Image: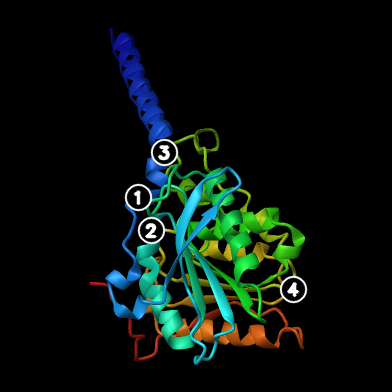
Amino acid sequence: MVVRLFAGLAKLVACCYGTFVGVIFIFQRKLQYFPLAKRPPHPSHFSPFFASVEDISIVTADNVKLDGWFWPADKNRKHANVSILHLHGNAGNRQHRLGWAYAVRQRYGCAVTLVDYRGYGGNEGSPSEAGLILDAIAAITWHCDTNGGNGAKLVLHLESIGSVAGIGALRMLDPVRRTKIVGIVVEGGLSSCIDVVKDRLRFLPLSVLMMDKWSGACAAASKLTVETSFLSLHGSDDTIVPLSLGRKLYEAVACKNKEFVQFVGGGHNDLLEQPMYLQTLDKFYTTLVSLSATTLPCSSPSTVPVPLERNHLFELS
């Protein structure tokens, strides 16, 4: 009687576990990507500061049209020769990066391009690892071909999952375009998605279950052009992508001129609010100007202390 009871209980547990695993497998991309699919209004809807922002469209290799925004440089500012392509994280859309774009361009005059992936910001399709890499390839190709003239310094700013998408795309880009990218900034970067969740979901067979592992990021980082400058920014209190995973990606990077900056007390989505964030970008952009004349040594990981004052943020109403 007892044996039958335990056998029945074991079958029930196994059935429940199998059902749970099946549900996770079927809906896993809903749990990994959180796009705001609605097409955002033109930025000038929020503020006249954005009146010069241009609508752009990019077509991927599999014929998916991606919409984005290009904000030309402010020629009167310090880094007007820097042109940034921003590839965002797994949530929201390009509208949620307007505050960041405003802060960087207002302070330094950089040209900024914001592009949404498939399934984000009114774009067709749905997100996946293969799809986002194709999107990143198309966006970086557009960036190189459109913004690479007149002595512009081309920079990639890769946020969260944008780090693995952008670095993976660079590995597949043709060598001529790849060498046009002189700087890469990774913010809240990760070594792989399976690394992010494996300690939290040890009871699941993730190596079999997970479709979008993004496990090739470190291998791709080891193939980056050695002359490209690399800056990794990470919050010490990041609970979404632990600091150790950002360091793991950084250690794999082949670039000679690289630096890891840790923001004390910073999380995953608030680095722009951290003291010295914009100043750290300023320092990085400044080094890009001198790279053609000299080669800088690889920097050791550093920590940004917490000074008294905070950066002013632009808030959308």
Choose the circle earlier in sequence order: 2 or 4.
2
- Type of amino acid at the residue the image marks with label 4: Glu
Left or right: 317 in relation to 41: left
Look at the picture and state if 42 lies above or below 99. above
Q: Quadrant of the C terminus?
A: bottom left
**Mark nearer the viewer, 2 or 3:** 2
Q: Quadrant of the N terminus?
A: top left
User: Tags 1 and 2 in contact by the CB under 8 Å rule?
Assistant: yes
Choose the circle earlier in sequence order: 2 or 3.
3
- Type of amino acid at the residue the image marks with label 1: Ala
Question: Which secondary structure, mark 4?
Answer: loop
- Type of amino acid at the residue the image marks with label 3: Gln
Tell me, yes or no, if residue 184 can be seen here.
no
Residue holding disc 4:
227
Around disc 3, counting alpha carbons within 10 Å, would you say few (fewer than 14), some (14 to 19), or many (20 or more)? some
Residue 21 position, x and y percent, is 40, 30
Residue holding disc 3:
28
Choose the circle earlier in sequence order: 3 or 4.
3
Look at the picture and state if 239 lies above or below 312. above
Residue 197 position, x and y percent, is 46, 48
Tell me, yes or no, if residue 70 can be seen here.
yes
Residue holding disc 2:
93
Q: Residue at x 73, y 59 (%)?
A: 223
Residue holding disc 1:
37
Look at the picture and state if 136 lies above or below 297. above
Question: Which secondary structure, mark 2?
Answer: loop
